[in-house]
Image (spheres, rainbow, N blue to C red):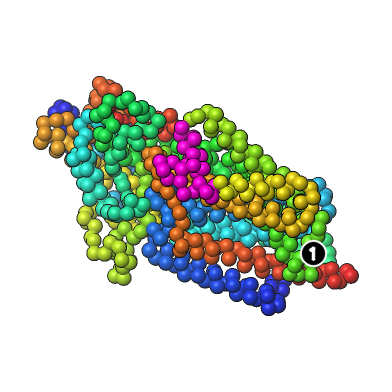
Amino acid sequence: MGVNRRKFLKIAGMSTLGAAAVPASSALAAVNPIEWLDKKLGGFTPFETLLHLFHTPVGFKPGEALTGKQWVMVVNVKELDDEIAEACRETCHRVHNVPQIDNPRHEIKWIWHSEYKHVFTGQHNEHIAEKYHHLPFLVMCNHCENPACVRVCPTKATFKRKQDGIVLMDMHRCIGCRFCMAACPFGARSFNWIIPWPRESAGTLPRFRKGKEPPNPEYPTRVKGVVEKCNFCAERLAKGQIPACVEVCQEAAKEKGKEPALAFGDLADPDSEVRELLHSHFSIRRKPELGTGPNVYYIV
Amino acid sequence: MLEKAFVGGRKYWTWMACLLGIMGLGFIMWLWQFRVGLGITGLSRDVSWGFYIGQFTYLVGVAAAGVMVVIPYYIHNYKAFGRITILAEFMAVGAVSMCLLFILVDLGNPVRALNVMLHPTPGSVLFWDMIVLNGYLFLNIFIGWNVLSAERKGSLPPGWIKPFIYLSIPWAISIHTVTAYLYAGLPGRHFWLTAVMAPRFLSSAFCAGPSLLILLCLIVRKTTRFDPGKEQILTLGGIVAYALILNVFLFVCELFTVFYSQIPGHMDHFTYLFFGLHGQGNLAPMMWAAFGLMAMAIILLVIPACRRDEGILAVACVLTIIGTWIDKGFGLVVGGFVPNPLHEVTEYWPTLPEALIALGVWATGLLIISVLYKVATTVKEEGEQKRA
Ligand code: SF4
Ligand code: SF4
């Protein structure tokens, strides 16, 4: 997997170098100027870049971003153990200021793990090899090809980003109708049932969550009454970083000399690591029969 | 005409004061919910819609049922219903108002509600639901008010109101169809993913709505000098009977498909509702009660002697209302969420504040209906006095 890891870094590096290299090559090859600009701006349209000047996704710098046509996650189930799964969950929730709520009814989960029979409902049978029964299958939003959540949202607060296929949430627009939660067939969405961070109510607080501060000052907090979910670390991709959970897995793999449990990449790129993984392994997706086209693959 | 709502006897004012009291209590509870979040309800990550949306769904039906009076009168020229069309329309106004309020109290961010209009999204059924509900509210106020004004002046309603009345008929069907589509097009929610959802909604609407109207007519007769009429009430009774039987029939169709096909994902929801799943089933007694009540109501309604007795008819109506209310206002919504997409069972039960907020909304709707009925019956009383 070392090669693949390098490839990752290569993508990251290229996009920084790209800023300098692209103009020269484009002059030579006389490429479409719009495409050139598009690349230069790191996959964002000029309009979006303008928008970002006023409404910055944290740390976004044109040219540095990781870009792809359709990001996918590949979960290498055999490499998962409780420790890794928990590390992914903890890191993701920390970097995204996901409120930690003990009451399971009000819990907010971007990434978590569950048993095979819960993750692959309908594909379960009693005779599946014992070791699979209790493996911690990581689950998150599938950033579906044809997302039901986007279809039903009455405000476009949740939308599929055209340039790279990530399904995003605008937590400033969401009215909290929770139609998307009813529509998502994977239970990937969470609602802020209670005040997520104390600062919202400026001083006079209800009794819960007093005094806790959001751990990552760079990532926005949100208010109660909005829906949230995994964003494939869009804010990190914009800075040229891979998703936090994937980074955790890569580091753990390096330490233990194993393969990383998570891989992330561009499905549209034939040379990407994820394409290679999917090519050489048998993989499944959750509830493909529903036609949402999940972009999280499980190698079993 | 509205001034007529401000003249009333002691009973009228006591009733209004009670409603205002309940509304006030509900409002205080809602302020609390507004401040600390929807966490004060029994809702959860797994059951993310509950009591509020259930009431909303139920009341859309009650509102739509106005057409059961409008169609016979305006299309089939069944003259007797001319006396009560205004009551049906004003009941619809109250019901749609409650619908809109229930949506509002269910929103996590009510102050942003206008986003639905600022960012119109024709692909979302909720967007259309907002349009048809508001349109229906407008149509009923507009038609009802104009027809009543004409009646007060002793003249016929203006001719240009007719197109609006005809428009209100498909519109009524549309509000409940679109509401059914909120549910019936979601992949992965097998309980709702059925083509008979809209027909079932309509059939339950057409029994619950007229039942409520019958009760309202009886109350109007008791409390005012205007008598909606025996024939009218009995005909409504017949409509309830047909619709209720159709409702149960469609439910049986659903049961057949689900249990004969034996597809676990489809059966689980029904199993949960009626027998419990993984040892959890706190809705089961209510669901059995719902269908028990509906069965009793059917028996009372199909025996002609019973149906024609207004006392027994009233009982059958109450049974119908409660039965369909549990089925649609509770089981339908919660049943769709249990088990959840990961096949885990999280149960739902409304909390006290949640119930009080819902009660407050009901009180608001009843207040609107009371005011409008007061106006309507006063105009009718005066008209009859003049003619006499
Ligand atoms: S997994 Fe659910 S929330 Fe994520 S894109 Fe698909 S439907 Fe939407
Ligand atoms: S809760 Fe928010 S994101 Fe979900 S459908 Fe409603 S407005 Fe859209």
Q: Residue at x 18, y 40 (%)?
A: A83
Give the labeled residue for mark 1.
B227
Image location of residue A24, percent across then percent down: 21, 33
Q: Is residue A186 left or right of residue B209?
A: left
Image location of residue B13, percent across then percent down: 65, 76
Q: Residue at x 42, y 53 (%)?
A: B43
Image location of residue A118, percent across then percent down: 35, 36
Q: Is residue A127 left or right of residue B308?
A: left
Q: Secondary structure at mark 1?
A: loop
Considering only vertical position in the picture, is B372 above or below A286? below
Main SS, magenta region, reads helix
Q: Is residue A275 magenta?
A: no
Please state which of residues A119 and A196 is positioned toward the viewer in this rendering: A119
How many residues crowd around disc 1 within 10 Å: few (fewer than 14), some, or many (20 or more)?
some
Question: If the image is split into quadrants, where does the C terminus of chain A sit?
Answer: top left
* Residue range highlighted in magenta: B264-287
Considering only vertical position in the picture, is B69 above or below A289? below
Q: Which quadrant holds residue A287?
A: top left
Q: Amino acid at mark 1?
A: Asp
* Chain letter for the residue marked with disc 1 in the picture: B
Q: Is residue B281 magenta?
A: yes
Considering only vertical position in the picture, is B154 above or below A154? below
Please state which of residues A248 and A137 is positioned toward the viewer in this rendering: A137
Please state which of residues A52 and B46 is positioned toward the viewer in this rendering: B46
Q: Which quadrant holds residue A274?
A: top left
Q: Residue at x 50, y 64 (%)?
A: B356
